[in-house]
Image: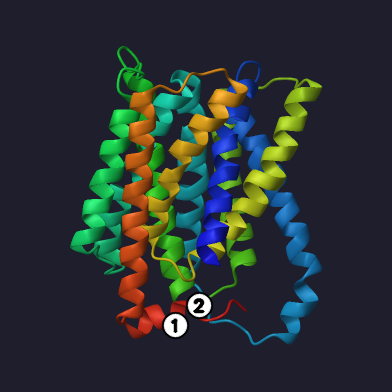
């Protein structure tokens, strides 16, 4: 079930690329990101208050360090999401998506250092195949020359997301806070950072009705719901495995671009997409095989039913 949920989230996030590119034609990137995540935070806060009565009757969770929540919020929303909007402003969506396919490498390195969740040989092979597929898919389509500022900003976004995933995985593995509160608190912290960045740039805009529709949809479905489900999935899926699974967004973005942006899909791109899917499947099969073959007590605790 967590894998099905995670794939559903990737579909939502893939659609974000199309909606964001449309919105950025009129709305400054940081202001756009701030509106989206501020509205999503309000929605999550309301949901948390509605469910507070149920929580009062539930066993109290172990305390989580406030520093962890602050860092997760700053990395996952202020840096990862805010910088991704800026990167999309400077780069085509296809170039941004390509750069972010290297996120599993960041997650793997940070995960080994802080969680002790190392990848097996077969998983590394799957990752390499997926990355090679991404390179084949985007071969001849990338437009990075003269856009190094956008490239750098997007890389920083990717590192921020990797750090967020690792920190959330660590928090969820310790069962210290439920997924809804975790998502609400970290997003609220991240929104505060986005507000400060937006005020610093001084770039604002009056939104048209279509852009308000984009913001509301992105906030509700692609943010409040999607981030809650993603954080829930991290209770039972390793950060590295989940981030590799996120690379199926390449396939989804290609299909959505073909349908909504009239972008062609060539035979070479199909080969690349097939390689991405093969690599992702290899990693996930190795993950499932490792879980059936034995794992640590900490990983067993992480697969308990969510409170």
Mark-to-mark CA distance, 2 and 1: 8 Å
- Number of labels in the image equals 2
Query: Residue 206, can we see it?
Result: yes
Left or right: residue 205 versus residue 95 is right
Could you tell me which residue is drawn at 57 percent across and 44 percent down?
Answer: 11
Which residue, as the protein is rendered here, is positioned at the far left? Answer: 121
Could you tell me which residue is drawn at 51 percent across and 53 percent down?
Answer: 73
Q: Secondary structure at mark 1?
A: helix
Q: Nearer the viewer, residue 126 or 190?
A: 126
Q: Is residue 179 above or below residue 61?
A: above
Of labels 2 and 1, earlier in sequence is 2
Q: Is residue 26 above or below residue 188?
A: above
Could you tell me which residue is drawn at 62 percent across and 16 percent down?
Answer: 25
* Residue that badge 1 annotates: 301
Q: Quadrant of the N terminus?
A: bottom right
Q: Quadrant of the C terminus?
A: bottom right
Left or right: residue 57 versus residue 197 is right
Which residue, as the protein is rendered here, is positioned at the far front? Answer: 267
The numbered disc on residue 175 is: 2
Query: Residue 28, can we see it?
Result: no
Q: Neighbour class for label 1 at 10 Å: few (<14), some, many (≥20)?
A: some
Q: Nearer the viewer, residue 17 or 126?
A: 126
Q: Secondary structure at mark 2?
A: loop
**Residue 155 in the image: x percent, y percent?**
34, 35
**Residue 243 in the image: x percent, y percent?**
40, 52
Q: Is residue 217 above or below residue 41?
A: above
The numbered disc on residue 16 is: none
Left or right: residue 14 versus residue 284 is right
Q: Is residue 72 above or below residue 80?
A: below
**Residue 242 in the image: x percent, y percent?**
42, 57
- Is disc 2 in contact with disc 1, using a CB cutoff of under 8 Å? yes
**Residue 259 in the image: x percent, y percent?**
60, 25
């Amino acid at each position: 079930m967590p894998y099905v949920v995670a794939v559903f989230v990737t579909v939502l996030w893939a659609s974000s690329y199309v909606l964001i590119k449309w919105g950025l034609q009129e709305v400054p990137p940081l202001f756009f990101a701030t509106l989206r995540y501020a509205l999503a935070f309000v929605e999550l806060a309301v949901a948390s208050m509605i469910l507070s009565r149920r929580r009062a009757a539930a066993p109290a969770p172990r305390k989580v360090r406030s520093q962890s929540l602050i860092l997760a919020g700053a990395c996952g929303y202020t840096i990862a999401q805010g910088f991704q909007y800026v990167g999309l402003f400077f780069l085509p969506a296809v170039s941004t998506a390509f750069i972010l396919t290297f996120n599993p490498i960041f997650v793997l390195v940070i995960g080994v250092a802080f969680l002790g969740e190392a990848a097996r040989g077969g998983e590394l092979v799957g990752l390499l195949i997926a990355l090679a597929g991404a390179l084949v898919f985007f071969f001849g389509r990338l437009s990075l020359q003269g856009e190094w500022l956008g490239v750098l900003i997007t890389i920083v976004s990717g590192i921020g997301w990797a750090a967020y995933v690792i920190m959330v995985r660590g928090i969820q593995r310790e069962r210290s806070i439920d997924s809804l509160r975790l998502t609400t608190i970290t997003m609220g912290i991240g929104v505060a950072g986005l507000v400060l960045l937006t005020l610093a740039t001084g770039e604002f805009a009056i939104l048209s009705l279509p852009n308000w529709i984009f913001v509301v949809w992105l906030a509700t479905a692609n943010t409040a719901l999607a981030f809650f489900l993603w954080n829930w999935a991290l209770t039972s899926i390793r950060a590295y495995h989940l981030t590799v699974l996120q690379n199926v967004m390449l396939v989804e973005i290609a299909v959505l671009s073909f349908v909504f942006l009239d972008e062609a899909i060539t035979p070479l791109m199909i080969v690349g997409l097939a390689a991405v899917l093969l690599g992702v499947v290899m990693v996930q099969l190795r993950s499932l095989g490792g879980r059936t073959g034995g794992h640590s007590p900490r990983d067993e605790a992480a697969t308990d039913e969510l409170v």
